[in-house]
Amino acid sequence: MRTIQQENAAVVTAFIEDIANQSVMDSTEQFFAPQIVEAFTGRRYTVDEILVQGEKVIARIFMTTVHSGHFAGNAPTGKTVKLTQFREFRVIDGQITEHRGWFDTATLLPQIQAQ
């Protein structure tokens, strides 16, 4: 039998990796999130690490994508890049009741800047 924490981690992992939730994963409260969606195509989300404490689940997620449009003053490179995203979820009775996310552009910008 799995613990509540294991169940909550499984619920969040399934949510993140389900392509049907792509638009949810693409959006955050950060002002530049729409620019990321426009500049990076073929986005795929995978869970790197999950931490669970009761109903709170924190996930570090990798978005693997292609830099196909202008972003932060950088012309498209065509490179496949890996962007880190963090998401905080609240899971109650096996259902995600709230979540928010943040992109870590510090991991992205060095990958797309001209060398």
Image: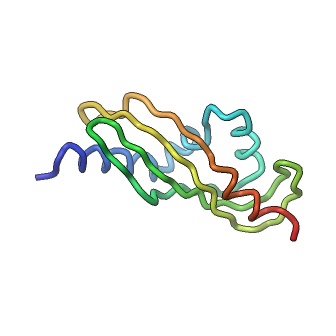
Q: Quadrant of residue 11?
A: top left
Q: How many numbered badges does the structure rendering display?
A: 0
Task: Identify the residue shown where x is 45% and y is 39%.
Answer: 88
Q: Is residue 94 left or right of residue 1?
A: right
Task: Identify the residue shown where x is 34% and y is 37%.
Answer: 56
Percent of width and height locating residue 104: 63, 49
Q: Quadrant of residue 32?
A: top right
Percent of width and height locating residue 60: 48, 52
Residue ranking furthest to the bottom: 115
13, 32: nearer the viewer: 32
Task: Identify the residue shown where x is 16% and y is 51%.
Answer: 2
Q: Quadrant of residue 95?
A: top left
The C terminus appears in which quarter of the rendering? bottom right
99, 95: nearer the viewer: 99
Q: How is the image coloured?
A: rainbow
Q: Is residue 99 left or right of residue 14?
A: right
Q: Is residue 71 above or below residue 78?
A: above
Q: Is residue 55 above or below residue 19?
A: above
Residue ranking furthest to the left: 1
Percent of width and height locating residue 83: 63, 57
Q: Is residue 39 left or right of residue 94?
A: right
